[in-house]
Amino acid sequence: MNNSITKLFHIKYPMIQAGMIWCSGWRLASAVSNAGGLGIIGAGSMYPEVLRTHIRKCKGATAHPFAVNVPLLYPNIQEIMDIIVEEGVKIVFTSAGNPATWTQFLKEKGITVVHVIANTKFALKAEACGVDAIVAEGFEAGGHNGREETTTLCLIPMVKAAVKIPVIAAGGIASGAAMLAAFALGAVAVQIGSAFAVAEESSAHPNFKHKIINATEGDTKLQMKKLVPVRLLKNHFAELISQAEANGANTQQLAEILGRARAKLGMFEGDMEEGELEIGQVSAMLDEIKPAAQILQEIWEDFLSTKQQLQDLKF
Amino acid sequence: MNNSITKLFHIKYPMIQAGMIWCSGWRLASAVSNAGGLGIIGAGSMYPEVLRTHIRKCKGATAHPFAVNVPLLYPNIQEIMDIIVEEGVKIVFTSAGNPATWTQFLKEKGITVVHVIANTKFALKAEACGVDAIVAEGFEAGGHNGREETTTLCLIPMVKAAVKIPVIAAGGIASGAAMLAAFALGAVAVQIGSAFAVAEESSAHPNFKHKIINATEGDTKLQMKKLVPVRLLKNHFAELISQAEANGANTQQLAEILGRARAKLGMFEGDMEEGELEIGQVSAMLDEIKPAAQILQEIWEDFLSTKQQLQDLKF
């Protein structure tokens, strides 16, 4: 397949593995890149020097392009960006923040820049900042999410109509059928999170992976809307937040319940009751821990066969 | 087009106009049916004898099949069902309730029965009750909605995998691209609400239609989750509910703010601040009041051209 995204990233398949805290280190990123997709190291859960190690190991593990995802709301962004430049990373995905400051910095170093958004307003802003492509992420996506709660089905066509740069769809995509749906809506690539969070190469704790593959409909919920909306898997911590929200807890009270390092506690250290477990709604459809290359290949083959089925519809 | 749904209903296009309170009377239903889709009279906002009048006028206005939608939570269901049988209605869509009681009653009269669900559990239950097809409605849909908040993109493949009967996708569909996306996900037809709520033939108040076509991203929100979740367009009433919910209002307090006849006040009588305005997230993409036949034809042509574009993708 040859389109604006495979050309932009020099990859075989228009499939991108989402940069996910506590899941996507060099092992997952290099496995996806070696399989023909774009692997992404998620810098959001890494100290700067940890990130440097992951970048170096990723370079050693794959000759194919890979990227780093940088949530822009962290305090030590300059240090992270310097490491990215020093280590010769070619593609950066920015998220959770304003792309105005860093897009030009990265572009001047010859780096391809993609920004993640959840509404048309920020898609237009990112385009004006000079990013090369947009990830448009719907309400069903795991982790941090937009306040408008616009679903992937509604978001992609609106963003597609608004911008000229390529649109990558994210949120709810873990099958070739969903990938084809995203293409029907105007996307030219997909970003896949949850399905790769349970890959063998994901650094998520085995407890977390097993909880994801056992999740069913309604087991995730967008919570903490008074802080930053985040989609979480149900557990004791999520229930505490849920009750507090139902009782009208304010921002400060929610922040106190959240405390610190809850995501690490759950996703990386494996505490399934007290940890913060970020995952997408599509986790209800996942039921197996498999190698990343197999996940990618199965989605791609499903994409092709679903496309053939649609072509065969008679009129 | 010839598939399980067009054959089941004896219609030309696999496109169904949702039964919507205060919007879909005989004028809208007959216009959609005359255009080759399936028009539905929404009984939810009609006294029994008003429904009888609408059925009779619809029969006079179209020789094509049409249906009646019956929310099963109303007290006078027996009276409504008797009128449906007496007037010779051939197709009934049931929603908002348990299909166990009424499916057999209707099937024994030779009536085709479809039930609207928002999760796999109720899809299986409806299938076991003997319904002929399922409408699976996602989080982005207007009006009453499921507690799981599963989006159309995530819901359709799960329901499709669970049941053997045909699946009709609803929620977020107002374009041929979205219709094709639903087909990629496994649906064999779509139910379209918001786009027909602003049809010329819709009985919605002109103020409401204009507010819908002026709506933008984030202007609808799923509210009143402690009562029955319902997607509403932002206005003074929705803001009152929103504030009450943020402050931890309980079921009774929400019911008091809601009061009675709020939906009629807004959707039918045109009070855009105090009325309850039920509409889907996809309202952000609607920008014109047009005849129902034109809406249907434009979606169908967009479906065909999007299908062609997908076929032309090179590998």
Image: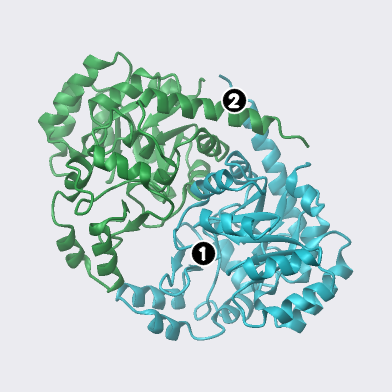
Chain colours: A green, B cyan
Q: Position of residue B256 (x, y in %)?
A: 43, 86
Q: Earlier in the sequence, mark 1 or mark 2?
A: 1
Q: Residue visible at 67% across and 82% down?
A: B76
| Nearest to the observer: residue A66 or residue B4 | B4
On screen, residue B31 versus residue B314, left or right, reads right
On screen, residue A217 versus residue A272, left or right, reads right
Labelled disc at residue A28: none
Report which quarter residue B184 is drawn in.
top right
Mark 1 neighbour class, 10 Å CA radius: few under 14, some 14 to 19, many 20 or more: many
Element on which disc 2 rests: loop
Pointers 1 and 2 in contact (CB under 8 A)?
Answer: no
Report whether residue B118 is seen: no
| Nearest to the observer: residue A227 or residue B273 | A227
Q: Quadrant of the C terminus of chain A?
A: top right
Q: Chain of mark 1?
A: B
* Image vertical order of residue A87 relative to residue A99, above or below: above
Most distant residue in the left direction? A49
Report whether residue A208 is seen: yes
| Nearest to the observer: residue A135 or residue B226 | B226
> What's under tag 1, amino acid-wise?
Asn
Numbered label tally: 2
Mark 2 neighbour class, 10 Å CA radius: few under 14, some 14 to 19, many 20 or more: few
Element on which disc 1 rests: loop
> Which residue position holds label 2?
B313
Q: CA distance from mark 1 to mark 2?
A: 36 Å
Report which quarter residue A101 is drawn in.
top left
> What's under tag 2, amino acid-wise?
Leu
Q: Residue visible at 78% across and 70% down?
A: B26
Q: Position of residue A253 (x, y in %)?
A: 18, 67
> Which residue position holds label 1?
B145
Q: Position of residue B226 (x, y in %)?
A: 40, 73
Q: Residue visible at 64% across and 37% down?
A: B306
